[in-house]
Image (cartoon, helix red, strand yellow):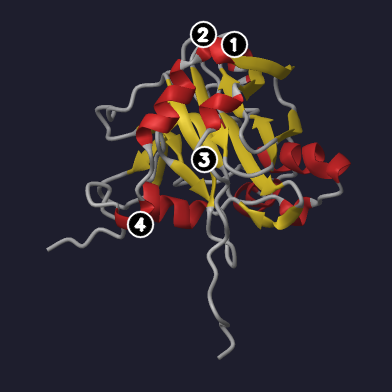
Amino acid sequence: MVQLYHDPDNPGRLAIDKAFYARLAEAADRRTPVDQFILPIRTGRAWPVRQGQLCRIVAVEGPQVCDFNAWNLHNPRERFWAARTRQLQGAHVTTFDRLWSCLPYLRPMLTFTNDTLPTEPTPNGGRCHDLLGTRCDPYLYKLVEDRDFNLTCHNLLTRAIAPHHLTELDVHDVLNVFQVTGLDPVHEIYFMEPSPAKQGDLLEFFAEIDLLCALSNCPSGDLSVWIGQDGGDPLPTCKPIGVEVYDVDPALLEGWTPPEPVRIGSVYG
């Protein structure tokens, strides 16, 4: 018998008010834009999203993958925890899933309210919005290929958060937005497929706490061309990414309260 780490059909104390988040998504006429920008190809940027706000990541010109990090705006030691999120939500996220923070906090940082990408698996079993992998980085290129290569999402995220007094040590495992991935059935090795995103596709979330978010617009574009493979350069497949932040009508937030960290005694005995 297979024992699920978390059974979504019997969520218990982890149940969420889906009707509340659905109302936030549907009430497009009850939100006010407060920030909007375009992330050019092969760049990164960090920005705040306040608790109670909505944020959209938009494929403004077509397929393009991007790598997402998040921290507590006031305490960067509390940050998105990909492994626990994977155990609680699954290897790929969509509407009504959440991103959870690391220990010793363990609370939902954000909840997804809208996702226009397909949720059904590809013929190879891949799905979109990936928690299986992590960002590309220059250390792996040096280890595997013995070459210096600094056009990676790790580099871009590091540069993006530097103005916020964070460093390379604060960059963490990511949510790969608009990216299709899976595990091959023989070796359980991570695989990637080209992004299916179309112009205007989006992933939207509700900030449960004050967040600092960061995004890398992946140098590998839509993943239809591999960097270095037969001299390939995915530059022609790279496209900009849009980010939009909204205030919502306070009446829509009635009854909602920001989640508190889990409180225990002491882990030291």
Task: Where is residue 111? Give x, y as percent.
Answer: 49, 38
Q: In this rendering, is residue 34 above or below 79?
A: above
Quadrant showing the N terminus: bottom left
Label of residue 60 in the image: 1
Q: Alpha-carbon distance for marks 4 and 3?
A: 16 Å
Label located before the other in sequence (2 or 1): 1
Per the model, the C-alpha gap separating discs 2 and 3 is 33 Å
Q: Write the residue at 75% across / 31% down.
A: 45
Is 126 displayed left or right of 28 in the figure? left
Q: Residues within 10 Å of mark 2 (few under 14, many from 20)?
A: few
Amino acid type, label 1: Val
Measured Cα–Cα span from mark 2 to mark 1: 5 Å
- Of pointers 4 and 1, the one earlier in the residue sequence: 4
Q: Where is residue 173? Give x, y as percent.
A: 58, 50
Residue 197: % across, % down: 46, 17
Q: Quick check: 86 left or right of 42?
A: left
- Mark 1 surroundings within 10 Å by alpha-carbon count, few (fewer than 14), some (14 through 19), many (20 or more): many
Q: Which residue is mark 3?
A: 256
What amino acid is labelled 3 in the image?
Trp
Q: Secondary structure at mark 4?
A: helix
Which mark is first along the chain, 3 or 2? 2
Whether label 2 touches label 1, CB < 8 Å: yes
Q: Earlier in the sequence, mark 4 or mark 3?
A: 4
Q: Amino acid at mark 2?
A: Gln
Select label 4 or label 2 by which is in front.
4
> Which residue extends farthest bottom?
269
Q: Which residue is mark 4?
A: 13
Mark 3 or mark 1, earlier in chain: 1
Q: Which residue is mark 2?
A: 199
Distance CA(mark 3)–CA(mark 1):
31 Å
Secondary structure under badge 3?
loop
